[in-house]
Image: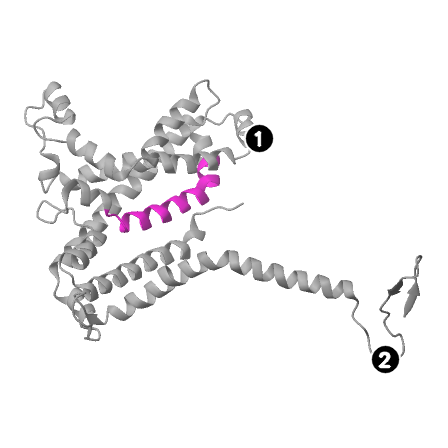
């Protein structure tokens, strides 16, 4: 329909037909909006494309390729040779070094997870106070967790030096004539790495616990105080139950982190002495990049993944028995 406008111009207006069975002419405004939405969708995909490509190449493809290569023998220089499940059979039945690395990793887990969780929780309880200057202590405790693991490892190698390190100097000062040779002893190397890992990561998990503590309603503590509850009773009856979701999260993350432990053994002991600090990931690294057994290293990585998955599944399966979400 044509509508005259001032000046003699004609304005075209599209009208929908109201008759039954009549066609409907899509207004120009709707077509413009549809075109705009289509263009916005394409722009969104263009912005997502780099990250999506990186995810597909470096995650999806890498996972699929590692599974495929675990069924082969491959040294990076010759074509892969298909061997089926031979790599898995070897590491599960013949490889004593794999079993030693697994035992070391379990040892680290049993040492780091409970001790580190307890230390982080105690630190969070100590700094969860409205006291002047507390921000400084929170920052100081958090700093090691954001510092370079390599730099920290090198510093601690100096500190634990048997002859000139500050740790043994202090032990001699207090009367211990023959302090341990920390990183060169099969007895003391693992405990030294455990203490080092706990010290480095305590601040990070302290912040997580601190967030959980500050989410507990203050009214509950006030009511308990009126009822005459002691600080110990308030901790066991209020703090611990309401903090259980945070504790569960910390336990899950710590176990996964310890099973992936690599930097500290690599920097401080190179897996020694006599393989006593060789973790699973460090053993994977040696097979892949020192001995060029890529297929075998991939098989170990998949076994490690299945172990972590099983442990995490058990944690989630039985969390309802002690985690309180109310």
Q: Nearer the viewer, residue 184 or 312?
A: 184
Left or right position of 202 against 171:
right
Residue 179 pos. (x, y %): 9, 28
Q: Is residue 30 above or below residue 21?
A: above
Q: Quadrant of residue 272?
A: top left
Residue 68 pos. (x, y %): 28, 71
The residue lying at 69 percent from left, 64 percent from top is 34
Q: Quadrant of residue 295?
A: bottom left
Residue 309 pos. (x, y %): 34, 59
The residue lying at 25 percent from left, 69 percent from top is 69
Which scheme is used to colour this image of the protein? one colour
Q: Nearer the viewer, residue 160 or 237?
A: 160
Measure the alpha-carbon separation of dots 1 and 2. Answer: 68 Å
Q: Which residue is mark 2?
A: 22
The residue lying at 19 percent from left, 59 percent from top is 288
Quadrant of image for the C terminus: top right
Q: Is residue 84 above or below residue 49?
A: below
Left or right position of 62 against 81:
right
Quadrant of image for the N terminus: bottom right
Q: Which residue is mark 1?
A: 219
Question: Is 241 one of the magenta-colored residues?
Answer: yes
Residue 39 pos. (x, y %): 62, 61
Q: Which residues are magenta?
A: 237-262
Image disc number at residue 280: none
């Amino acid at each position: 329909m044509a509508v005259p406008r001032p000046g003699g111009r004609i304005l075209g207006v599209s009208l929908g037909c109201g008759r039954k069975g009549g066609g409907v002419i899509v207004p120009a405004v709707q077509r413009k909006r549809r075109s705009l939405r289509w263009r916005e969708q394409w722009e969104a995909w263009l912005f997502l494309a780099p990250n999506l490509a990186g995810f597909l190449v470096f995650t999806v493809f890498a996972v699929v390729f590692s599974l495929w290569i675990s069924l082969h023998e491959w040294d990076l220089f010759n074509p892969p040779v298909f061997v089926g499940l031979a790599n898995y059979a070897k590491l599960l039945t013949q490889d004593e070094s794999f079993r030693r690395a697994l035992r070391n990793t379990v040892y680290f887990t049993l040492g780091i997870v409970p001790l580190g969780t307890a230390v982080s929780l105690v630190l969070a309880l100590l700094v969860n106070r409205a006291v002047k200057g507390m921000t400084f202590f929170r920052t100081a405790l958090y700093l090691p967790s954001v510092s370079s693991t390599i730099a920290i490892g090198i510093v601690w190698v100096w500190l634990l030096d048997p002859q000139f390190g500050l740790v043994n100097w202090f032990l001699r000062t207090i009367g211990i004539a023959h302090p341990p040779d920390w990183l060169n002893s099969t007895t003391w190397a693992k405990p030294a790495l455990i203490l080092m890992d706990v010290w480095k990561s305590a601040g990070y998990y302290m912040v997580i616990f601190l967030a959980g503590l500050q989410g507990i309603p203050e009214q509950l503590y006030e009511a308990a105080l009126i009822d005459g509850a002691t600080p110990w009773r308030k901790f066991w009856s209020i703090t611990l139950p309401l903090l259980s979701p945070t504790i569960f999260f910390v336990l899950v993350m710590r176990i996964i982190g310890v099973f992936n432990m690599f930097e500290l053994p690599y920097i401080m002991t190179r897996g020694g002495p006599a393989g006593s600090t060789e973790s699973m990931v460090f053993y994977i690294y040696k097979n892949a990049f020192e001995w060029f057994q890529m297929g075998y290293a991939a098989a170990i990585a998949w076994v490690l993944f299945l172990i972590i998955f099983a442990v995490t599944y058990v944690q989630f399966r039985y969390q309802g028995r002690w985690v309180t979400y109310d």
